[in-house]
């Protein structure tokens, strides 16, 4: 095991440069071990003490740096004994290449390559990352004995009427885990989108293929390394410390006042003729008035129907074939 002067900042530098990270002792007990490039296991001192195994993914998009900084600060406190680890935890850096260059992606949006879609894009640099992440998520959870939680931490391109929100992937026949939504509320999450269809995102993969409680979290606006106001991330920081430190198990009473939305449909860009009729300043969750033409692509037009519809993740610059926005509407749990 290495010396205590090894910091999380150095770990991040080494990981982004593709250098090996040595095995490290956590000062208050436990260890940190590099599994493969950009993937780290943090093991509590007492094997078997963990009743919830936690997978934390950051940097799936290379321009979304705040979650990397939040998780590295927690790792630094674990390394130096300011926090004691109670849960078996795996941390994945999603796209180290894109994090180095500060771009959302280099060749292809990584969060559109999961659930096997990487096989259709073998030449894209992100395909190898999707495979690495799927494999290491699978091996991690295959030796779990208790509850299993995956949090994929992101920040968004646009501002948002709900600054922090969660996305629950489509669950097929599984019921919503209300206690997890309760915990997300305690972590400062202000709204939750319930997806209504399969997707090629990482949280859909871990949820659907591995049966894990999985969420994509949008924690604020995407900014470059060094430009994040980490005080705006205090809710998730506190909640992750309580989770990893064993003070809570990631479950809490569901608050029925938490706004919930369901995805009605995706705006899928068909061609370069796609036109989005929303200015860059329009924020996520902005209501759409009935009759408003949201977007057009050749003959196709998407028209708002009212009834509380709102727009999420509008982005006309995506590749043809990919989602250029989601129309959502309020929903309540049965
Ligand atoms: O701000 C944006 O337009 C995108 C932010 C982002 O990366 N969001 C995720 C959401 C994943 C999901 O829908 O489950 C993404 O687009 O990959
Ligand atoms: Zn993202």
Image: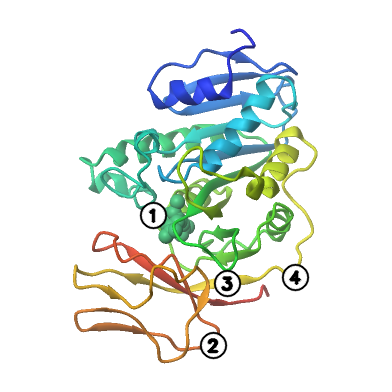
- Residue 165, relative to residue 65: is it above or below? below
Label number found at residue 307: 2
- Check disc 1 and report the residue beneath it: 200
The mark that comes first in sequence, 1 or 4, is: 1
Q: CA distance from mark 2 to mark 1?
A: 28 Å
The mark that comes first in sequence, 1 or 3, is: 1
The mark that comes first in sequence, 2 or 1, is: 1
Q: In which quadrant is the C terminus drawn?
A: bottom right
Label number found at residue 256: 4
Left or right? Give the position of 198 relative to 30.
left
Q: Position of residue 32 (x, y in %)?
A: 59, 20
Q: How many residues crowd around disc 3 within 10 Å: few (fewer than 14), some, or many (20 or more)?
A: many
Name the front one of labels 2 and 1: 2
Q: CA distance from mark 4 to mark 2?
A: 20 Å
Within the image, what quadrant is residue 173 found in?
bottom right
The mark that comes first in sequence, 3 or 4, is: 4
Left or right? Give the position of 90 relative to 254.
left
- Check disc 3 and report the residue beneath it: 261
């Amino acid at each position: 095991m290495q010396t205590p002067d090894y910091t999380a900042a150095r770990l991040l530098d080494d990981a982004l440069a593709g250098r090996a990270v040595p095995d490290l002792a956590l000062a208050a007990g436990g260890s940190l071990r590099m599994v493969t490039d950009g993937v780290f296991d943090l093991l509590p001192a007492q094997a078997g003490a963990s009743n919830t195994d936690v997978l934390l993914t950051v940097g799936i998009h290379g321009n979304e740096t705040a979650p990397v900084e939040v998780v590295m600060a927690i790792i630094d406190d674990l390394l130096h004994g300011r926090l004691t680890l109670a849960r078996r935890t795996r941390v994945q850096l999603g796209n180290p290449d894109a994090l180095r260059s500060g771009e959302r992606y280099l060749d292809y949006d990584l969060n559109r390559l999961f659930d096997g879609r990487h096989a259709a894009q073998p030449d894209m640099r992100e395909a190898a990352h999707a495979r690495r992440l799927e494999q290491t998520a699978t091996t991690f959870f295959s030796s779990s004995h208790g509850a299993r939680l995956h949090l994929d931490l992101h920040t968004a391109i646009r501002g948002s009427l709900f600054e922090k929100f969660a996305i629950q992937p489509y669950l097929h026949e599984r019921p919503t885990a209300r206690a997890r939504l309760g915990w997300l509320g305690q972590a400062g999450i202000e709204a939750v989108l319930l997806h209504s269809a399969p997707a090629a995102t990482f949280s859909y993969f871990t949820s659907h293929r591995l049966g894990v409680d999985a969420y994509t979290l949008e924690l604020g606006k995407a900014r470059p390394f060094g430009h994040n106001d980490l005080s705006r991330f205090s809710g998730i920081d506190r909640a992750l410390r309580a989770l990893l430190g064993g003070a809570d198990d990631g479950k809490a009473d569901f608050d029925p006042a938490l706004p919930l939305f369901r995805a009605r449909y995706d705006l899928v860009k068909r061609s370069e003729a796609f036109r989005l009729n929303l200015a860059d300043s329009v924020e996520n969750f902005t209501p759409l008035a009935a009759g408003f033409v949201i977007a057009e692509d050749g003959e196709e037009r998407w028209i708002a129907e009212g009834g509380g519809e709102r727009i999420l993740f509008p982005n006309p610059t995506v590749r043809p074939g990919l989602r250029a926005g989601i129309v959502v509407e309020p929903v309540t749990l049965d």
